[in-house]
Image: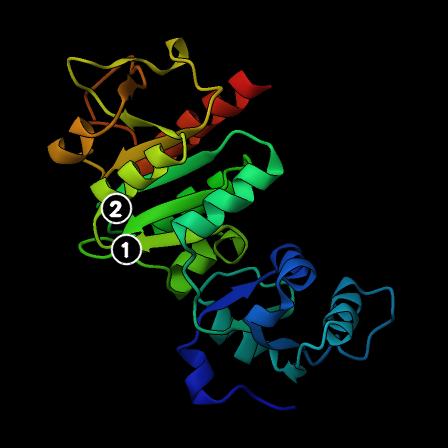
Amino acid sequence: MGAAPDADRAARVIYGVGPIRELVTQQPHRIVRLLVDERRSASSTTDVVVKLAEQARAARVSVGVATREELDSLAGEDARHQGVVAILAAFEYADIDDVSASIAASGRPALWVALDGVEDPRNLGAVIRTAYLVGAHGVIIPEHRAASVTAVTAKASAGASELLPIVKVGNLVRALEALKKHGVWTMAVHASEQSKPLASLDCKGPLCIVMGAEGSGVRQLTAEHCDFHGVIPMANAGVGSYNISVAAAMALYEVMRQRG
């Protein structure tokens, strides 16, 4: 198979051996085609890219070859694709009730992240990546005035957007109320009169961390529907607040620390 057609150049892609191997292992049906560097396709069978291509074929994924230049173009400027790029099918958003049923079957306390008006797809991708790494069960995003899962998001998440359930909702407040029906507590991470230091709050039970957009934070209406508020202390405030992806990482780490 030769070069990727023009349509693929606008497709959602992930790259790199690690993220693609995880996707091939868990959800190979999401891959439309796997492209490997033509210079490595005939390499030794000990080559990690060759092994990955074999694993993909065994999972019935279409595998082709491309030039280094074509892979560079697909992955984007300065991307370290390691000689392998996966072109993905249209993104499939998850359903809150379906994910909640899966969580209940797992026996683990739920851990969700809800993002209120985060518009930068790179920030969204970074939050998804961290959420996946700490073992969160899903991320909730609004349908309007917020970033969706795009190729940029997939790249920023290092492929985690394909492995972690992402729920898109028309009304975030209603989504939080739906989580409460499943026994999930909601915590707005932002500064308010009700806020307490995050480390002083009990995060061991079923929980949804609600994060707002950088600068504006969690909207008032959303915050009012959260069970409690947590704040991440800052020693200095001269440059504003934490970046949303950094704040989410610290909040998620605190939950993981408390849960051991």
Residue kind at label 1, given as amino acid type: Ala
* Residue 229 higher or lower than 156, as above or below: above
Q: Residue at 27% x, 37% y: name it.
A: 177
Mark 2: secondary structure: loop
Quadrant hosting residue 218:
top left
Mark number, residue 118: 2
- Quarter assignment of residue 238: top left
Residue in the picture at 56% in, 69% down: 30
Q: Position of residue 19 (x, y in %)?
A: 61, 56
**Which numbered tag is attached to residue 99?**
none
> Which of 238 and 224 lies nearest the eye of the viewer?
224
Q: Label 1: state its secondary structure.
A: loop
Q: Are marks 1 and 2 in contact (CB under 8 Å)?
A: yes
Label count reads 2
Q: Which mark is residue 147?
A: 1
The residue at the far right in this view is 45
* Residue 90 position within the rendered picture, expressed as x and y whole percent measured from the top left: 44, 73
Quick one: quadrant of the N terminus? Answer: bottom right
